[in-house]
Amino acid sequence: MKIKGPVRALGAMSGTSLDGIDAAVLVTDGVTITSFGDCDYREYSSRERAVLKAALGRWPGDDLDAAAHVVAKGHDVLLSGFDEIDLIGFHGQTLAHDPGGRGTHQLGDGAALADALGVPVVWDFRTADVRLGGQGAPLAPFYHFALAKWMNATAPLAFLNLGGVGNLTWIDPTRTRPEDDGALLAFDTGPANALLDDAMMTRTGRTRDEGGTLAARGQIDDAIVGAFLEHPYFFKIPPKSLDRDTFAGLAQAVRPLADADAAATLTAATALSVAEGLQHCPSPPATIWVCGGGRHNPTMMQMIDAATGARVRPVEDAGLNGDMLEAQAFAYLAVRVARGLPTSCAGTTGVRAAVSGGTVSTPDRAS
């Protein structure tokens, strides 16, 4: 499809924390951010969350009918509430991620969504990157670069997304384009909320450690955290990416601990993995801008601040919506795909050449 000038793009993101679907409108031409539009959220029910969790680790060809129904229904209901949309960026639900092996699998049918909503849909963002030798993740860094320009940043900065998995984007805002050499370095840092949320559900029946209050009362098991930091992942040079269950051993290790101590230990593991990640950055970022659910956890934020020694701030301090940054990112990437612009490069995923990854599905007007 041809795009001239800014359009109203709607991005949808359902992350590995399995909490629900974020949707946000962004007005952009795929290079410059013109304005931020309305947004909404649909929480998964406990039954829906259980269905999706049971499907984690599965690949195309497995029995995924129940999970596919949850993803399709949730997106249909949420996205149909938006008006005057030119283009949709549909991420789908990541079930498995094995770059260099079986590839990457995001559950969801973008063509069916386009027919249901009557709007062109860009989807399957990660496959092309993986086929060209990239990690297929993280994909938000090109949007982070655009945000740095929108913020009029002049010194290196970083965005840290604390979703199910943590990922960091280091940015040199003096570069012209995100694919320019030295403009970006991005990689997954380690677990963020996924293991902590799983532990809270199992132990307390709650979906999260609300406000970090449980972790704040606990004692960190330094031996467990020390063993965690010996994982081979931390010795890999970025770009690099993780599956949600890469650190299943950490979840096992904290099982004998009391609830508060387990929460404190898992939270500390997140903070220290971020500190490890910063060692790979070309220069220290002036500020680490935090988005994702983890920024609502004061204990996690305080631990990251202490571990990194950096200026750690929620993105709201820059006038942004930290709950919707990932959804906005896929709105932005959708426009780039439609225009044939790159969505990843060597500095973000390790892909051999800058690539525009995604499939554009237009509505079947006869359906």
Image: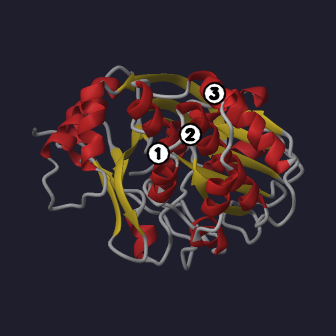
Is 32 rendered above or below residue 73?
below
Q: Are marks 1 and 2 in contact (CB under 8 Å)?
A: yes
| Sequence-first disc among 2 and 3 | 3
Dot 3 amino acid type: Gly
Q: Which residue is mark 3?
A: 212
Is 340 rendered above or below residue 112?
below
Q: Quadrant of residue 18?
A: top left
Q: Are marks 2 and 3 in contact (CB under 8 Å)?
A: no
Residue 9: give x, y in percent of width and height.
47, 36
**How far is mark 2 from mark 3, CA to CA?**
12 Å
Residue 327: give x, y in percent of width and height.
50, 37
The crowding category of the residue bearing disc 1, from other C-alpha atoms within 10 Å (few below 14, some 14 to 19, many at least 20), is few
Q: Which mark is residue 262?
A: 2
Asked if residue 332 lies left or right of residue 203, the reply is: right
Q: Residue at x 47, y 50 (%)?
A: 251
| Sequence-first disc among 1 and 3 | 3
Dot 2 amino acid type: Ala
Q: Quadrant of residue 79?
A: top left
**Secondary structure state at the residue bearing disc 1:** loop
**Secondary structure state at the residue bearing disc 2:** helix
The crowding category of the residue bearing disc 3, from other C-alpha atoms within 10 Å (few below 14, some 14 to 19, many at least 20), is many
Asked if residue 283 lies left or right of residue 72, the reply is: right
Dot 1 amino acid type: Arg
Judging depth in this view, the residue of 215 and 327 nearest the camera is 215
Judging depth in this view, the residue of 199 and 52 nearest the camera is 199
Q: Which residue is mark 1?
A: 255
Q: Are marks 1 and 3 in contact (CB under 8 Å)?
A: no
Q: Residue at x 87, y 57 (%)?
A: 284
- Asked if one can make out residue 213 in the rendered structure from this viewpoint, the answer is yes
Q: Residue at x 60, y 60 (%)?
A: 228
